[in-house]
Amino acid sequence: PTRRCCRVLVRVLVLVLVHGLGAATARTAAGRRLTPPGFRPANILAVETVPGRSHWNFMSAVLRALTDRGHSVVAFTSYPSQLPPSAHGNYTEVDTSAVLTRHAGERASRVLSDYSRLSYIVPSVVRWSRQFCDAVYDMEQVRALMVNGTDTAARFDLLVTEPLGSECVAHLAAAVGLPMVYVVPTPMITYMQPSIVGHSANPAYVPHLLYGSAVRAFRHRLANTAVYAYGRLVRWYAELTDRRRPYDVGQPAKPSVVFVNSHHVTEPTMLLPPNVIHVGGIHLDRPASGQLPTNIQEFIDNSPHGVVYFTFGSVVAMSSLPDHIQNTFKNVFRQIPQRVLWKFEGEMKDKPDNVMTGNWFPQRDVLLHPNVKLFISHGGISGVYEAVDAGVPVLGFPLYYDQPRNLQSLVNAGMAITMELLSINEQQFLHGIKELLHNPNYTKNAKITAERFKDRPMTPQESVVYWMEYVLRHKGAHHLKSEALNLTWYQYMLLDVILVFVVSFLVMMYLIYKTFRYFYSFVANHLISVKVKQQ
């Protein structure tokens, strides 16, 4: 028996070693496939001009993929970390928080009254973007990079930056002569899409970033087209009438590649050039720790009916919501058996017994907990992908910008319900919660959407690494850029060609008219002359 046990143990050890070697060989082979011959670590300059937490989360995830790969990154950010995002020691940060004020904790009244209006948000985004550019370009470190353009181009291989509402961010690339990559932390910026990639989406079926409805009936197509036209016109006018800066002189540089925080489960199908790469959910690059703080872990574990997680993100201060809306939420939460995790700033008055509040929760770990049954959200794209990744149904209250369209995509997927925050009442809110909790179709569709979201030929991180290195290998990969970028607006819309056809048609019609008139006159005169002769 002892020998038999020894033989079994030896076989088990052999199998473990073989399996381990096989796995290591597979990982090595995979690494070789992703590492082309002659790989050389690059020096990458990253400038985040938007002082928003969600914007930096996306940018930092892209940069982390590059530093994990072995590239060196120098990043300008208003959210400096205490530790580098990788353990390779090839990451340096320049703090811009002194010149870029962080955008967080807005009062709900301002968000609901101003940010939700198209007439306010588009020109404001253009104005903010240009102000951010002014602040960054005024920094001593950035001025030094631009003054010593030749040295900068020799020191760095690539520039990574984010466009918000203006191409002023491309001025640095043009000044120092570096190939440029855009990162877009939202779905594609529709009102800037023609300037970025040369093509505009078709308003007949692709909803505008700021149009929060599906495009199906004629009224939808009419309204969506109006939003497209209005967004383009307002952005053009806002830049035209603003004070002229050095970056307004000459043609801006165009990106070699654009990484967009989108995925086909939340983004309508549209035609895009090959240099637009979807990397939605890249901020989910690190596996969830699974270790929640003890008080939160116990709160969720000891909830026999499950947990509802409620947050409006970092931009809007939940405590600034009107009292009648806060009371609606509280009164409904008292009526449900589930416990509620509610991101709320400060102390909450008259807090329901089944509610835990906090200034911050580890959102991804919370959503991945199997006892979390519902996510109540404003529809920020990062939270949307975290809900999709976890397969959790969503009750959405879209506030502004891309949030209505983000949530509409989840509604189309059958995993969400949306409501208007300002008109919400207890009956509607309670019905929405019960529908999502007790109708199994929402959870089923959420799981299906999660499977589609995770089914990719390569991870977002691998996509970032591959295309960044593709740009480096091919000296900027300018062949990926659309020729439409070299056309004027009337050439792109074929107005000159249409004009030639129209003029040719009119000339042809005129010649036909003159020919018929000539023959008519000739025949008439001939008949008259014959008649006169007969008389």
Image (tube, grey):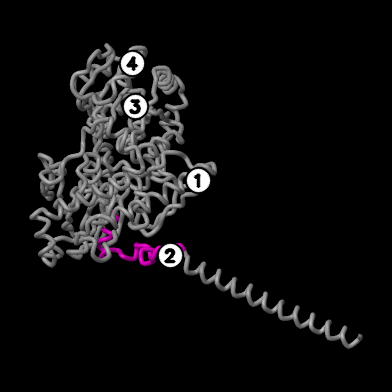
Callout 4 environment at 10 Å: few (<14), some (14 to 19), or many (20+)? many
Q: Which residue is mark 1?
A: 221
Mark 2 vs mark 4, CA separation in Å:
56 Å
Element carrying mark 4: helix
Disc 2 crowd rating (10 Å Cα; few below 14, some 14-19, many 20+) is few
**Quick check: marks 1 and 4 in contact, CB under 8 Å?**
no
Instruction: Look at discs 2 and 4 and give the one toward the viewer.
Output: 2
Mark 1, secondary structure of its residue: helix
- Which of the pair 105/383 is nearer the observer? 105
Circles 2 and 4, Cβ within 8 Å, touching? The answer is: no
Q: Which residues are magenta?
A: 466-493
Labels 2 and 3: the sequence-earlier one:
3
Q: Which residue is mark 3?
A: 375
Kindly identify which residue carries mark 2: 490
Label 3 vs 1, first from the N-terminus: 1
Is residue 469 in the magenta section? yes
Residue 119 drawn at (x, y percent):
35, 44
Could you tell me how far apart the alpha carbons at marks 2 and 1 are, in whole angstroms?
Answer: 23 Å
Query: Is the stretch drawn in magenta largely helix, strand or loop?
Result: helix
User: What amino acid is at disc 2?
Assistant: Tyr
Residue 314, by quadrant, is top left
Q: Inspect the image, locate mark 4, and give the three-letter code of the amino acid beneath it.
A: Phe
Local secondary structure at mark 2? helix
- Which label's residue is closer to the chain start, 2 or 1? 1
State the residue at coordinates (41%, 35%): 410
The amino acid type, in three-letter code, at marker 1 is Arg
